[in-house]
Image (cartoon, rainbow, N blue to C red):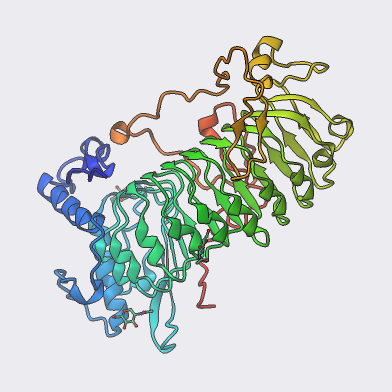
């Protein structure tokens, strides 16, 4: 893995500096090169994954000239003053009242009686959602070790998540979505043993997912709209999440058959717009709590598993823009709860009559190979794929083998339905982040551009983490 250079660009921050000079008139604080480099060096330190006993080893260089008798709030004061220094732009004056010793009165800070000593107040939560702050998340965040939730979505934080975050042993909810964070999967989150909700969407994280992520006892996991790549680890099925959103990344390979083990917990899974291949595993049919399945805009092939008919709670099924073949089973269209079934742009050659006769089912079959229905592919486009039957029930599981008996006389490569647009521009001139992440409740999402697909909002347990809650604190 190439480590980023220790300069600002390496941390996705390069847009900030020109912006600063434009927006801030002198003599306001602008970040000097030396300050920027110093921050970047500290970030790099954590980036290397150095784990050290943060609370004991870190040298506090902030002079405290305020009297705070409660030592826990004193640490929080240090943390928040350091954070304020790491903020370069605060257009809404969100941190303007971060002065003085009463950290519990700071915007975005929520205090509660400590769990181990109810006679003292501690910082139980931090919520800067939508504050539009630009800057870094400083290493001193590790001092906020009584915090149960940390919500900083829709800001302009860049760099990496400091490894000192592992000191937050009570952290239940971590939402850093819609920022400009970079680097490999932030493995520090694996150390957060109380974590239930992890939201990393709309950042620039890249590379593979660590298998340990799926051994964690999480309720919800949002990874969409990053640059994650590689296969999904085989232990996917160990996960306890009810919501899993992997959309709009560069994942590839097949879906592990262990997915069936998520049967008592998995409610929604969004796989759209990645490079997944292979057949949809039969084991998906075990997911009896599933209400939303979106596998659209991938390269799944083979037939639709009949086992999907067992998804008695399924409301929305989207398998559009893949290379699926065969007949759409009537048992799947017959799922009573199913209201929306989108299978456009595949190679299906027919559908059972249940599919087209139900008035309460939106059935979108455009761009397939149905002879008798409108808006279908041409015969010429259908033939090469349909002439190469795919065997899904291969002994070793999800691998789809092309049936070579009898060998095709000529085998043109199957047409790629969905060729990826050129990669998104590099973060050096990063486009402004999407305005809403998570999407606002009840947003009507119509996806003309696959890169703008947002996960459906309906039914999300955690569409937008409500501001102050005190998980574990009550
Ligand atoms: C923020 O504070 C500055 C200086 O006090 C003021 O000029 C500006 O109007 C404030 N901005 C907002 C959005 O309140
Ligand atoms: C946070 O750190 C302080 C100082 O080391 C310690 O007294 C306190 O018990 C810690 N809180 C938790 C929840 O571990
Ligand atoms: C996770 O799954 C793998 C097999 O896929 C298994 O070997 C391992 O023990 C599981 N880990 C936990 C923590 O359940």
Residue that appears at 58% across and 15% down? 411
Q: Is residue 394 above or below residue 283?
A: above
Residue that appears at 58% across and 62% down? 240
Q: Position of residue 328 (x, y in %)?
A: 78, 32
Q: Is residue 142 above or below residue 460?
A: below
Residue extending farthest to the front is 406
Instruction: State how many labels appear.
Output: 0
Answer whether residue 283 is visible to the viewer in this image: yes
Residue that appears at 78% across and 29% down? 327
Q: Quadrant of residue 220?
A: bottom right
Q: Position of residue 178 (x, y in %)?
A: 43, 46
State left or right for residue 16 relative to residue 296: left
Q: Nearer the viewer, residue 310 or 228?
A: 310
Quadrant where the image shows the C terminus: bottom right
Q: Nearer the viewer, residue 159 or 62?
A: 159
Residue that appears at 69% across and 54% down? 287
Q: Position of residue 126 (x, y in %)?
A: 41, 65
Q: Nearer the viewer, residue 400 or 329?
A: 400
Q: Position of residue 228 (x, y in %)?
A: 42, 43
Quadrant where the image shows the N terminus: top left
Q: Nearer the viewer, residue 150 or 339?
A: 339
State left or right for residue 155 relative to residue 220: left
Q: Is residue 288 above or below residue 335?
A: below
Answer whether residue 99 is visible to the viewer in this image: no
């Amino acid at each position: 893995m190439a480590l980023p250079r220790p300069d600002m660009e390496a941390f996705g921050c390069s847009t900030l500096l020109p912006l600063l000079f434009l927006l801030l008139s002198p003599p306001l604080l602008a970040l000097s090169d030396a300050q920027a480099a110093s921050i970047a060096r500290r970030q790099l330190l954590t980036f290397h994954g150095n784990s050290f006993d943060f609370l004991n080893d870190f040298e506090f260089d902030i002079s405290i000239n305020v009297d705070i008798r409660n030592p826990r709030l004193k640490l929080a004061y240090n943390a928040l003053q350091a954070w304020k220094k790491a903020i370069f732009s605060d257009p809404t004056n969100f941190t303007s009242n971060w002065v003085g010793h009463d950290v519990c009165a700071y915007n975005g800070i929520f205090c509660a009686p400590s769990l181990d000593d109810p006679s003292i107040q501690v910082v139980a939560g931090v919520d800067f959602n939508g504050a539009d702050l630009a800057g870094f998340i400083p290493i001193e965040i590790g001092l906020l070790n009584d915090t149960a939730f940390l919500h900083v979505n829709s800001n302009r934080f860049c760099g990496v998540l400091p490894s000192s975050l592992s000191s937050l042993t009570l952290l239940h909810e971590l939402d850093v979505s819609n920022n400009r964070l970079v680097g490999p999967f932030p493995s520090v989150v694996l150390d957060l043993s109380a974590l239930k909700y992890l939201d990393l969407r709309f950042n620039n994280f890249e590379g593979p997912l660590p298998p340990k992520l799926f051994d964690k006892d999480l309720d919800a996991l949002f990874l969409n709209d990053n640059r994650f790549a590689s296969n999904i680890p085989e232990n996917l099925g160990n996960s306890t999440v009810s919501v899993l959103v992997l959309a709009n990344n560069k994942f590839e390979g097949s879906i592990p058959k262990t997915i069936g083990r998520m049967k008592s917990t998995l409610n929604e899974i969004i796989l759209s717009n990645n490079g997944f291949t292979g057949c949809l595993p039969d084991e998906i049919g075990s997911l009896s709590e599933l209400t939303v399945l979106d596998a659209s805009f991938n390269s799944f092939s083979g037939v639709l598993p009949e086992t999907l008919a067992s998804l008695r709670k399924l409301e929305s099924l989207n398998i559009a823009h893949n290379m699926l073949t065969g007949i759409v089973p009537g048992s799947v269209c017959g799922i009573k709860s199913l209201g929306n079934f989108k299978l456009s742009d595949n190679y299906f050659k027919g559908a059972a009559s249940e599919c087209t006769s139900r008035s309460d089912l939106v059935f979108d079959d455009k761009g397939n190979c149905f002879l008798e229905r409108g808006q279908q592919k041409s015969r010429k486009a259908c033939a090469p794929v349909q002439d190469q039957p795919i065997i899904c029930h291969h002994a070793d599981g999800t691998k789809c083998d092309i049936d070579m008996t009898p060998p095709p006389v000529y085998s043109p490569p199957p047409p790629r339905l969905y060729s990826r647009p050129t990669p998104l521009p590099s973060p050096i001139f990063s486009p402004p982040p999407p305005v809403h992440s998570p999407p606002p409740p009840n947003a009507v999402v119509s996806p003309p551009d696959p890169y703008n697909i947002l996960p459906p909002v309906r039914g999300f347990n955690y569409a937008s983490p409500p501001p102050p809650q005190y998980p574990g604190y009550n």
